[in-house]
Image (spheres, rainbow, N blue to C red):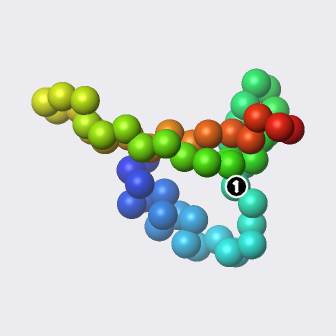
């Protein structure tokens, strides 16, 4: 999924909905994201969703 596809999918949801991700067999809130620029020819830039580690 690209960032544009993710934004399009999220735009269809209620704005107050929380975003969760699967983490260690359960669900965790997404608390941040990290951006990694393309690392070489043919490699895409990446967005990494980071779970809340305080849950």
Q: Residue drawn 13% across and 30% down?
A: 41
Q: Secondary structure at mark 1?
A: loop
**Residue at figure coordinates x 81%, y 33% from the top left:** 26
**What percent of the width, then of the height, locates residue 4?**
39, 60
The residue pinned by badge 1 equals 19
Q: Is residue 41 found left or right of 52 in the rendered image? A: left
Q: Residue furthest left?
A: 41
**Residue found at the far right of this picture:** 55
The residue at the point 86 percent across, 38 percent down is 55
Q: Quadrant of residue 53?
A: top right
Q: Residues within 10 Å of mark 1 (few under 14, many from 20)?
A: few
In this view, the residue in front, 13 or 46, is 46
Q: Is residue 36 above or below residue 32?
A: above
- Indicate the position of residue 32 as horizontal and vertical percent values: 61, 48
- Count of all numbered marks drawn on residues in the image: 1
Foreground: 14 or 54? Answer: 54
Q: Is residue 31 above or below residue 13?
A: above
Q: Nearer the viewer, residue 36 or 11?
A: 36
Q: Residue furthest top?
A: 24
Q: Where on the picture, by quarter, is residue 28?
A: top right
Expressed as whole percent of the image width and height from the top left, the position of residue 47 reads: 44, 44
């Amino acid at each position: 999924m690209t960032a544009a596809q993710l934004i399009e999918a999220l735009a269809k949801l209620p704005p107050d909905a929380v975003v969760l991700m699967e983490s260690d067999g359960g669900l965790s809130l997404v608390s941040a994201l990290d951006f990694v620029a393309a690392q070489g020819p043919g490699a895409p830039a990446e967005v990494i969703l980071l779970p809340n580690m305080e849950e």
